[in-house]
Amino acid sequence: MAWQPAETRYDRMKYNRLGKSGLKLPAISLGLWHNFGGDTRHELKREICRTAFDLGITHFDLANNYGPPPGSAESAFGEILRTDFAGLRDEMVISSKAGYEMWKGPYGEWGGRKYMIASCDQSLKRTGLDYFDIFYSHRFDPETPLEETMLTLDHIVRSGRALYVGISSYNSKRTREAYKILKELKTPFVIHQPSYSMINRWIEEDGLVDTLEDLGLGSIVFSPLAQGMLTSKYLGGLPEGSRATQDKSLNKDFLNDKNVENIRALNRIAEKRGQTLAQMALAWVLRGGRITSALIGASKPSQVVDCVAAIETPEFTKAELDEIDKYAREADINLWAASAERKGPARKKKS
Ligand SMILES: NC(=O)c1ccc[n+]([C@@H]2O[C@H](COP(=O)([O-])OP(=O)(O)OC[C@H]3O[C@@H](n4cnc5c(N)ncnc54)[C@H](OP(=O)(O)O)[C@@H]3O)[C@@H](O)[C@H]2O)c1
């Protein structure tokens, strides 16, 4: 018999309004950056997606380049949409992005109109979708006029390829500039996707969180578990098959003695609160209601189950927040600068 989603799928998850828009996102969303490429069994990808949907995760985040090879995560998710998720499209918010290198030559990356529209069309084809719910500019392009990138996002909506648009990893100043252009065009710009976690706080320091609140935009924060470092998995060494043991995006040098000691201290705080470190890390980014959704990744269904329990978190006391600050700030990691997707904003030198 074909797989059927759980009747209870909407009983537990919290759905938060995305800024001042008409769209709600689950407090926990699932991203398909890793573990959805050609290097992962299709059956495992299906199990992760089914588990997520059964637990009320209605939002699945993609990008043109997710894999490996680039594009394969979109193809795999397209297959799951046609099989397990057939008939469920209207219960889901599916996003994709263009910005990073997708094909060779001068039209294969960044924020120009030619690249972005071709890439969006390719992404629609791979997923088999008629439209994305959200389409993003994946990174700010320092050479293409911002107006061109924003007009392209506007065109993507007006031509029926997406319902809403967003930007990812733009700083506060660029976000205000993008907002001004899109506001004039009346483009449904509703979301920003930056990185954020207890040990990566650039969006607080840059003023982006205040800017988003001021502009009425929602936010979905990526790598809230610092790619797995803010979980219990690395407390006793590097487990076989974990992201840090693969040559992907997590530099295992981050897991040095000093950092692991601080992560152990964070784990003790989580234990005292009666939750796992992953749950505390997710509850922390969502504290105070300023962030709409925490965008996790997962290599097995049990991780999704563990993460979703973060929505039943106890409130943080001032003493707990201070203690978290102490250890998290000591962990000497700048993930935003270090992540494989964070090689911008400098453009490659032209030869
Ligand atoms: N816009 C951008 O530029 C950008 C950049 C990066 C990511 N993203 C988006 O954000 C999504 C999430 O990023 P991310 O994968 O780095 O997020 P993350 O949630 O910080 O890290 C996910 C990894 O943490 C580990 N993990 C998750 N839950 C766990 C649990 N309960 N217990 C133990 N370990 C657990 C797994 O590592 P193992 O695989 O080692 O088991 C998993 O692959 C991506 O899929 C993508 O959609 C966007």
Image (cartoon, rainbow, N blue to C red):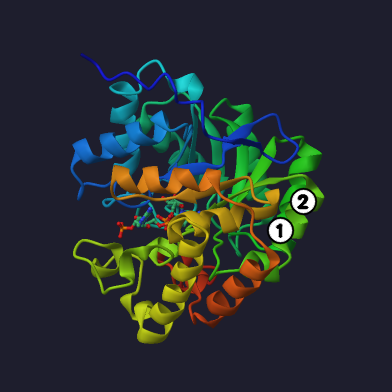
Where on the image, by quarter, is ligand 1?
A: bottom left
Q: In which quarter of the image is residue 258?
A: bottom left
Disc 1 target residue: 209
Q: Nearer the viewer, residue 46 or 132?
A: 46
Between 179 and 143, the one nearer to me in the picture: 179
Depth check: give the residue in front, 141 or 21: 21
User: Which residue is pictured at 20% across the width and 50% down the height?
Assistant: 39
**Could you tell me which residue is drawn at 77 percent across and 51 percent down?**
213
Is any atom of residue 115 visible in this view? no
Q: Is 239 drawn above or below residue 194 in the view shown?
A: below
Image spot of residue 75 (x, y percent): 30, 36
Give percent across and percent down for residue 318: 70, 66
| Quarter that holds the C terminus | bottom left
- Which of the 4 image quadrants contains residue 257? bottom left
Which percent across, then down, holds residue 322? 65, 73
276 vs 153, left or right, is left
Relative horizontal placement of residue 72, taking residue 209 as reference (left or right): left
Q: Position of residue 37 (x, y in %)?
A: 26, 47
User: At numbered mark 2, what does the secondary structure look like: helix, strand or loop?
Assistant: helix
Disc 1 crowd, CA 10 A, few/some/many (<14, 14-19, 20+): many
Q: Residue at x 36, y 64 (%)?
A: 232
Instruction: Look at the image and tell me in which quarter the N terminus lies.
Output: top left
The dot on residue 67 is: none
**Few, some or many residues within 10 Å of mark 2 (<14, 14–19, 20+):** some
Above or below 139: residue 185: above
Q: Confirm or deny contact between disc 1 and disc 2 (CB under 8 A).
A: yes
Amino acid type assigned to the residue bearing label 1 in the image: Val
Mark identifier at residue 213: 2
